[in-house]
Amino acid sequence: MAYSCTSLLLLSFLILYGSLPLSQSNQFCDAGVGYTESTCGFSSTSSSKLLIKGGTVVNAHNQEVADVYVEDGIIVAVRPNIKQVDEDVTLLDATGKYVMPGGIDPHTHLAMEFMGTETIDDFFSGQAAALAGGTTMHIDFVIPVSGSLVAGFEAYKKKAKKSCMNYGFHMAITKWDESVSREMEIMVKEKGINSFKFFMAYKGSLMISDELLLQGLKRCKSLGALAMVHAENGDAVFEGQNRMIDLGITGPEGHALSRPPVLEGEATSRAIRLAKFVNTPLYVVHVMSIDAMEEISKARKSGQKVVGEAVVSGLVLNDSGLWNPDFITAAKYVMSPPIREAGHDKALQAALSTGVLQLVGTDHCTFNSTQKAFGIDDFRKIPNGVNGIEERMHLVWDTMVESGQISVTDFVRITSTECARIFNIYPRKGAILVGSDADIIIFNPNSSFEISARTHHSRTDTNVYDGRKGKGKVEVTIVGGRVAWQDNELKVAPGSGKYIELPPFSYLFDGIDKADAKYLSSLQAPVKRFSAS
Ligand code: URP
Ligand code: ZN
Ligand code: ZN
């Protein structure tokens, strides 16, 4: 793990924030040139000029050899042979390398209170890890406070004060009444949130009923917000868990056995059908099984607007780790829906390469070994979640591009562009175009990566991808026109991150009103009847 740190001021800021124990306080920051003392973040006034020379610029729609010139956080030119005119331009040589949009992770949980504890990565450590892995923006899930969306939003605003990159928010809906419905409007119209997540699992905590889901889908539609679902049948999962405990299966393998793919398939199908009934777009998060993927495939073929999100753990892991005789090793793989038997991983890769699934997230939700040990005697108490925010770009490259399943332009689409389009911030994000934000990575396809819990930047002490090696390496990460990762070193500061508002009515809503009008005109009802004389 390589960091540099030179400022006592920044150090005291971190300690003041109470986020880092003293022993960790010097791990992430470089308060050298370019940081203002007042915020310990990037200076908002100083100009920054970058010239990236000689790389192959890759967008989702094409690739070309070109230089990229950046000023004050914005891409101002993309063309061959840009000359360095000013002395204060920082030059980056990308010859033989790819210059791509920074990754956007659509699914993370930083500083999330969950299952009686809180994720070990907060908005600083999680984002620092992301930047080291080439991700420059993520969208995190706000959890309401006592059902209140406004209170939840305020709480997450506070948590995110220590951010060092771009972030946006989704909002979970955990109960239903008039005030939730009103607050959804406030979130969309005033707070920059354009998606709401409904948990069909986690009975007794986050789980919602079909009745609530229906109300939520209708409200999402009227606001132009995207409805998202965690699709597992929570009642059946509860039954499955009791079944395992009755059988004396209390270890991490009981987690997978208690919630088989059929329960994910059922809930996915149910959510898709309810979204069809309401005629509103649906986003299915963390698709982990063939069962769920096939439901999405069927719906998409029929013309329904359903987005399927793959996550790295589902693409590259199988459930064998859950049977490891060492509890901590096995418990680190516990997430929901569970990591499936071998075969599901390959099928999900194929679905991603053929467009059945459209993008890749991580569901980064980290708990350390001490936290995972809460469930030493009962798998139901193991906090659910795995890491991935730092590893996603490398693993997707190695698994999908190096294996020949997708092209380099596809890589950009599934790790960045499609997410920007779905959440309505393209081409500001997800593109290397004139006028886009300068969130850029320089990727060396001829280098290699190796993942290790000893060297990763997450605060957790385990890594579900520990020991994985592969081809390709993010050598430079630029966020908002500033170099945040170079020469295996992070140059980040808390407070320098930017909240990105996500506007409603993305392209997924195009044609929804026309389909509604067509439906209404097709009804041939009410039928005018003669009253009996
Ligand atoms: O196990 C998981 N996925 N933890 C995070 C919460 C969720 O369901 O997304
Ligand atoms: Zn979930
Ligand atoms: Zn999640």
Image (tube, rainbow, N blue to C red):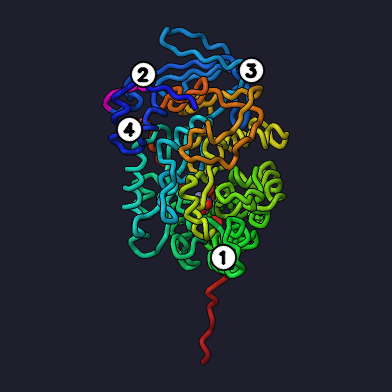
User: What's the distance in space between the residues labelled 3 and 2, CA to CA?
Assistant: 30 Å
User: What's the distance in space between the residues labelled 2 and 4, CA to CA?
Assistant: 16 Å
- Image coords of residue 413 (percent x, y): 60, 36
- Image coords of residue 148 (percent x, y): 34, 57
Residue 8 makes an appearance in the image: yes
- From the Cβ of disc 1, is ligand 1 less than 8 Å away? no
| Residue type beneath disc 3 | Gly
Residue 512 makes an appearance in the image: no
Foreground tag (3 vs 1)? 1
The residue beneath circle 4 is 14
Question: Secondary structure under badge 3?
Answer: loop
The residue beneath circle 3 is 96
* Tag shown at residue 241: 1
Foreground tag (3 vs 4)? 4
Main secondary-structure element of the magenta-colored stretch: loop
First along the sequence among labels 2 and 4: 4
Q: Is residue 236 magenta?
A: no
How packed mark 2 is, by other alpha carbons closer than 10 Å (few <14, some 14-19, many 20 or more), is: few
